[in-house]
Image: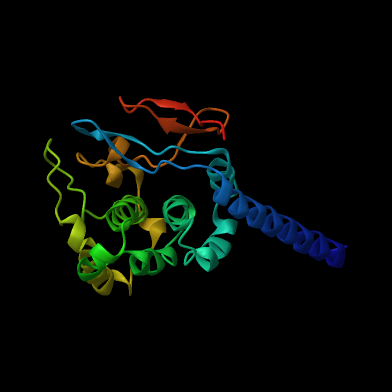
Amino acid sequence: MEKNGLLALNQEKRTTADEVQDLIQRLHTTSWDGSFTVGMSPTSGTHHVTKPIQRIFEIGAPAQELLLQKLPDAKIQEQLIFLLGGIGDEKAIPAIINSMVEEKNLRDNPNAKRINFIANVALTNLTAADVFFPKSGGNIIYNCNLEESKFCWQRWWRQNASHFTTKTVKDADRMFQCYPSYGIYRMKNNNSTYYDFDAQGKPRPVQDE
């Protein structure tokens, strides 16, 4: 019985891994508009959650290792950063920071500012640290310039890597003033369906592919 249970568990892991691999491939063919604040209100944002992104969110932590392996893929890197910010743990933090673009290289990468902003959203969700998004104030005045944000997070990680764990982060820690949807990265309804956010910060069902 114990052997059969182990075989069934291994089969389930293989099935999940196969599904995640397939979903990662679908990221290549599914348009994603990114994650950003909307209008003048810094607490209103949209994450443009697509069907593949939604499904990976539902799979959760078991998808992390494959996402980390694929992170260097420039074509879907922004989506992978966003996903790791939702389902990752402390292992994802240095990988996301490494994927950010240093100030001296910004001109060489036309997507650099977008990559860095999405990384700031992801890292803030994982850590609830006010490295980039401030926890007070009603205006969009960031604690660190977007161009320098990789350095800011590197400094934070050097100070916290030895003891930080995402398990210690509580929802109450995410009450940022200048962060899309008050730092609520993933919102579920009673049926555990993930939602996107409209311009007023209200949830809406995920968009179709």
Residue at 69%, 55% in the rendered image: 16
Residue at 26%, 70% in the rendered image: 154
- Residue 122 location (% of width, % of height): 36, 52
Work out whether residue 126 or residue 109 is closer to the camera in this orientation and state it. 109
* 168 shown above or below 156: above
Residue at 39%, 58% in the rendered image: 166
Residue 33 left/right relative to 57: left
Quarter of the picture holding the C terminus = top right
- Residue 69 location (% of width, % of height): 54, 68
- Residue 202 location (% of width, % of height): 36, 25
Residue 114 left/right relative to 28: left
Residue 89 left/right relative to 29: left
* 191 shown above or below 106: above
- What is the basis of the colouring in this image? rainbow
Work out whether residue 33 or residue 90 is closer to the camera in this orientation and state it. 33
Work out whether residue 80 or residue 128 is closer to the camera in this orientation and state it. 80
- Residue 56 location (% of width, % of height): 57, 48
* 58 shown above or below 127: above
Residue at 14%, 53% in the rendered image: 143
| Residue 157 figure quarter | bottom left
Work out whether residue 136 or residue 42 is closer to the camera in this orientation and state it. 42
The image shows a total of numbered marks equal to 0
| Residue 35 figure quarter | top left
Quarter of the picture holding the N terminus = bottom right
